[in-house]
Amino acid sequence: MNVALFEAMADQLIPASEDMPSASQANVGTIGITQVLSFRPDLEVIIEGILKQCEGKSAEAAIKSLAPGDFATFAEVVASAYFMNEEVRAKLHYHGQQPKPIVPEEIDPALLKPVLDRGPIYR
């Protein structure tokens, strides 16, 4: 995979800001893409095809040349790789999904009443 092109295109979607790293600074083209493709290996061929059709173009021109479906796939992979970065998640104060037990007192009895009134049902 052309990591330089991938990261240049990714930086067009996620540029650096005052307190957040750009896509390339978050290693989306190396660590991030590896993580994403470990979950979705079917996307590797698609990303390779996208990069192949963008070779020789500037990052901005490459992004603009993508068909809507290819753009959506590319953007989803870039965003996924970006948000898997520990530094990015720490700056967003997002520490992943955590189990949260349901406390019976938090359940509104009015919502449960129709379920309890109908009684047990089985197939």
Image (spheres, rainbow, N blue to C red):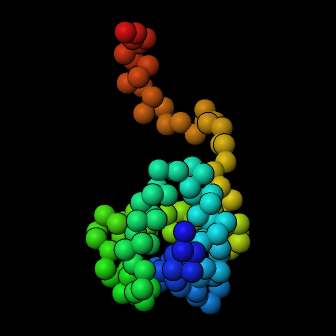
Report the number of discs: 0
Q: Residue at x 67, y 48 (%)?
A: 98
**Which quadrant of the rendered structure holds the C terminus?**
top left
User: Looking at the picture, does residue 31 appear above or below residue 114?
Assistant: below
User: Looking at the picture, does residue 64 appear above or below residue 85?
Assistant: below
**The furthest residue to the left:** 67
User: Looking at the picture, does residue 17 appear above or below residue 82?
Assistant: below
Foreground of the two, 109 or 23: 23
Foreground of the two, 86 or 120: 86
**Can residue 82 be seen in this snapshot?**
no
Q: Residue at x 62, y 65 (%)?
A: 32
Q: Residue at x 42, y 33 (%)?
A: 111
Residue 63 placed where, x, y %?
38, 80
**Can residue 113 be seen in this snapshot?**
yes
- The quadrant in which residue 36 appears is bottom right
**Left or right of 71, for residue 25:** right
**Which quadrant of the rendered structure holds the N terminus?**
bottom right
**Left or right of 13, for residue 89:** right
Residue 71 placed where, x, y %?
36, 70
Residue 23 placed where, x, y %?
58, 77
Q: Residue at x 67, y 66 (%)?
A: 31
Foreground of the two, 3 or 110: 3
**Left or right of 67, for residue 58:** right
Residue 60 placed where, x, y %?
40, 87
Foreground of the two, 91 or 76: 76
**Left or right of 81, for residue 58:** left
